Amino acid sequence: MFAIMNTARRLACAGTLLTAALLIPSGCGDLLDVEPPDLIPAEGLAIPGNAQLLVNGAIGDFECAFGAYVALSGVMAHEMLDATQTASRWPYDRRNLTPQDSYGYFGCTALGVYTPLSTARWSADFILENLQGWTDQEVEGRQRLVALAAAYSGYSHLLMAEGFCSVAIDLSAELSPQEVTQRAIERFDVAVQAAGAAGASDVQNLARVGRARAYLGLGQTGPALQDAQAVPADFEWVATASGDFSRRANRIFAQNGEGGLYYQRKYTSLADPLPVATGDEARLIVAEIQGGQTAVDIINALHARAGLAPFPGGTEAEIQAHVLEERRRELWLEGHRFFDIRRLNLPLIPEPGLPYRKGGLYGNDRCFPIPDVEVRNNPNVG
């Protein structure tokens, strides 16, 4: 076990330390969840009168995929520990995946990530393409809908780029994370422009945070800083959740949230939303890029809000180290740590080669391999 001190907005725990949450399934039924029979293929609905419906559907696809990604990448990053007797989940905790593992083909309610994110990406791109072909006269509020579809496509692309060693899109050849990140930036560009035309500052900030995150991942600190600085400190965009239907449930709480000793308390119900983009993330991007007193001030604003002692600063290396620690605490269980470990080449804990408590040895995976489900069905891969 290891301890986490977390200053995140919604975390509440007894005392100041929370032992790493154990990933517990909410029940055996998660593997038996099926999609509702009233889901209709989007192609048959592609008329202007259904524009809002299709955007809502794309958002719903993303929210379910996002929850699964946050949960499973959290295990890979050891934000949570697997405590099940289900051997098929051990490779995530042990960090030694194979392309045949369930992340590639399970649905989002059973913690699949590749297929759900691919579906979310397709849904958003499908309605975006249609919206760009329709007119403002045909679709009320078209520019805001364009911005939403483009932003959610951007985030779907971005999570695939951050989480996977390589991916394929629409039967493409195998794409590198950098190529997919660039596609995400292109979608965010569309979202920022359309949101500006619609006067939708909330959607514009959603896209700016995503674009700043994408640029940071590519090491392009200039445009990342520009976007991050434009986002208000109190901004927050969430993936909504509900306990009424498994696809809508908060995936972290569904897996880890009811009773026991080592449980997270950031999310306290199946209906708790999951942050997708926040002003805190934007400020931490600014802190990482600018360092120095700017970073110290940002850290101390977060500490003051959480009732923690101020950070006194230090050398630039010490400040940068604390910025990364602040990201670990502040963005805990929000889908960031897995990629931070990868992009910054942070040490893997426990170290690769050490014995895993359920058998075998810890591996050194820092990304999900492109799964067999893609290789088998895509003639341009493999």
Image (tube, rainbow, N blue to C red):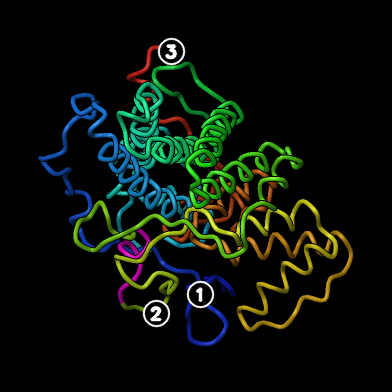
Q: Quadrant of the C terminus?
A: top left
The Cα atoms of the two marked residues, 2 and 3, are separated by 48 Å
Residue 113 horizontal/vertical position (percent): 38, 42
| Label 3: element kind | loop
Q: Is residue 9 above or below residue 119?
A: below
What residue would you read off at disc 3? 380
Query: What secondary structure is found at the residue carrying circle 1?
Result: strand
Residue under numbered circle 2: 261
Q: Quadrant of residue 292?
A: bottom right
Please provide percent x and percent y for residue 311.
77, 75
**Residue 19 marker:** 1
Quarter of the figure with residue 258: bottom left
Q: Residue furthest front?
A: 137
Alpha carbon separation for disc pair 3 and 1:
45 Å
Q: Dots 2 and 1: beta carbons under 8 Å?
A: yes
| Residue 209 falls inside the magenta stretch | no
Q: Earlier in the sequence, mark 2 or mark 1?
A: 1
Q: Amino acid at mark 1?
A: Thr
